[in-house]
Image (tube, rainbow, N blue to C red):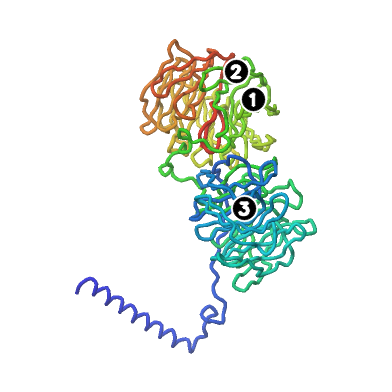
Amino acid sequence: MDRDTSRVVRRAVLWIVLLVLAAGCSGSSKSSPPTAAATDAGPRPVKRVLFRQLVPAPAGTLGTPVQDPATARLPGGAGAALLGGLTAADTSRSDIVTVTRAGVERHPGRLPVALHDAAAVTLGSLVYLFGGGDGVEQLDGIVQVDPLTGAAETIGRLPARSSDQTGAAVGDTAYVVGGYTGAKWLDTIVAWKRGGRARVVAHLPSPVRYAAVAAAGGRVVIAGGSLPNGTASREIYSFDPSSNAVRKIGVLPAATTHAAAAALGDVVYVVGGRGAVAGTPTSRIVAIDPVRGRVRPAGRLAEPLSDLGAAAVGGGILVVGGHGSSGAVATIYELRPGNAARRAPAAQVSSVYAADRAGMLTGAARFAKPLVYVPNSDSNTVDVIDQHTFRVVRHFGVGALPQHVVPSWDLKTLYVTNDIGNSLTTIDPRNGKPGRTLAVEDPYNMYFTPDGRYAVVVAERLARLDFRDAHSFKLVHSLSMPCRGVDHMDYSADGSYLIASCEFSGQLVKVDVAQQRVAGTLTLRSGAAPQDVKLSPDGSVFYVADMNANGVWLVDGDRLRVIGFRATGRGAHGLYPSRDGGTLYVTNRGEGSITRIDFATRRIVGKWRLPGGGSPDMGNVSADGKVLWLSGRYSREVYAISTRDGRLLARIPVGAGPHGLCVWPQPGRYSLGHTGILR
């Protein structure tokens, strides 16, 4: 018997057995009553819906802030399309913007008119925009947008001119919910199909504007919104397109309007929003099961936001823009299920510096002047160097003992950390000019948590890490360090923990970032003086420069143990990856040299010596990867070094005690702080 014939026979036997069993079950049913689940009249089993906590992961920044954009999923789920919206100055936009999960932003075209507070849904390969306002009047257009080419044209009309509505799609039909005509609040649900006419198919119990709307389980969920009496709603409604029926299924934890919504599987997540009064954004994420009517808390945003855009992408939700505590924002986050946000094994991490390649400027960094900012610790000044001419173009005073110039998480601002001055001096990277002075205690150094929520001020003389609000710098939590001289640090590949160096006690401290608590300590050899810390591209090892051991330690951060040592040169201090992520530059301050370590092999591959000596300390690599800029700590100078051959391109006189200089702009999606650790 051949293989195919044997397979047919086996199938036939199986079917006979199943028929016999079925007949037996049928016969036994005469003496045993059927269960409810087995009868057509009884209730059917309901599929279990999994409520997941969502965790925000940074995904980049937009070129400019935006609020109230009409937002829809890109076809294929690769990202989100943002149509129109308001600028930070509350003027309408005509921009068509697409954003991917990797933070890649495109501007393929413009809408026929600038507008905001419209609804948008994706049907097939196109995005459709409904109504909106232009600052003067409400609109009734239905605009078809190709997010790939940016082509946009008006192809239909709503039953009434309206703004402040939201929408969702079920199958091939778009549903537009509520809104405002300029004179009347709307309680309508409008259905529209391509090639058809928009028509009212249902009415809500109350008129509503700015509701959070998404579709899941074949139903449209309408949550919260603004009511005609000036309050915000807590009501959650479900609209069933098969019957056009609207029913209440639950309430939100708090009255919420101006929120966004998106669905993962059969669960709708209501993201952010605010109360009835402007300026009260929330970070709440609420999960809703529209079939069972269950409502659960589901996490927090990295910062309170209203008027944001949200779209389901892959297994997460992309959150873009919005209105925060200080106005419109340009941040992009991906909300991921908690189990998906756990750290992958190091071998699965391609490169933590994948977004830092030459020329990959994003967000606000694209508009920064190419300058080098040099804090002169001993003269309480900052020198600003033009990267093209190698000349000082600006010089200004700051607070006492400036140590580092630190780029903000969102790449918009540079901060001079005035250690003894107990202050931060802001710098606008668009023009290189200083701005405000902010009171912050003992800012020797400063970093940012990967989600952009906190600034982590390294208070060296106070022996603590201060977690402060990343925008207001209000103190949230002080974490005492079990060591002396905490000064530098870097984060694990998933951002769940950081490793900080303690120069005066020769130790490393591991900190759980989410819990803001010490997770372990590691004492290096006697007399060690650990300095800069840098993660390898694959996330498997931390390199820690040791000024007294004259080299770098290789440390397994997960297990918090030393796995190797490389002797690089006297006074090893600063650590900087090359633009291609292949080489680590180690500055040897005590001998005027730079050692190169190959990340792949973890071996030393060469050393460059400064002609005439010097004291190379801290700095970074230019955006194009061609120049390594370093401060000469004890030489009152800055070095510009060719990364091609180690040739000294320039030796630039500056003030006394140049320390943590910042090369700006830098490629990357967001900044973790220091003199420019970008991811």
Q: Nearer the viewer, mark 3 or mark 2?
A: 3
What is the quadrant of the N terminus in the image? bottom left
Which residue lies at the image location 52% right of the left edge and 23% below the top edge? 387
276 sits left or right of 47 in the view: right
Residue in the foreground of this view, choosing between 58 and 132: 132
Q: Are marks 1 and 3 in contact (CB under 8 Å)?
A: no
Gap in angstroms between the C-alphas marked 3 and 2: 47 Å
Is residue 526 among the parts visible in the rendering?
no
The residue that disc 1 covers is 433
- Mark 1 and 2 residues: CB-CB less than 8 Å, in contact? no
Label 2 sits on a secondary structure element that is: strand
Rendered residue at 61%/51% (across/down): 112
Q: Which residue is mark 3?
A: 70
Q: Secondary structure at mark 3?
A: strand
Q: Label 3 neighbourhood size at 10 Å, few (<14), some (14-19), many (20+)? A: many
- From the viewer's side, name the closer residue of 477 and 560: 477
What is the three-letter code of the residue carrying label 2?
A: Asn
Find disc 2 in the rendering and name its residue.
Answer: 376
Label 1 and label 3: CA atoms lie apart by 35 Å
Query: Are the residues flagged by discs 3 and 2 in contact, CB closer than 8 Å?
Result: no
Q: Position of residue 414 (x, y in %)?
A: 61, 29
Q: Nearer the viewer, residue 114 or 614?
A: 114
Residue type for callout 3: Ala
> Where is residue 378 shown, x and y percent of the image?
61, 15
Mark 1 packing: few (<14 Cα in 10 Å), some, or many (20+)?
few
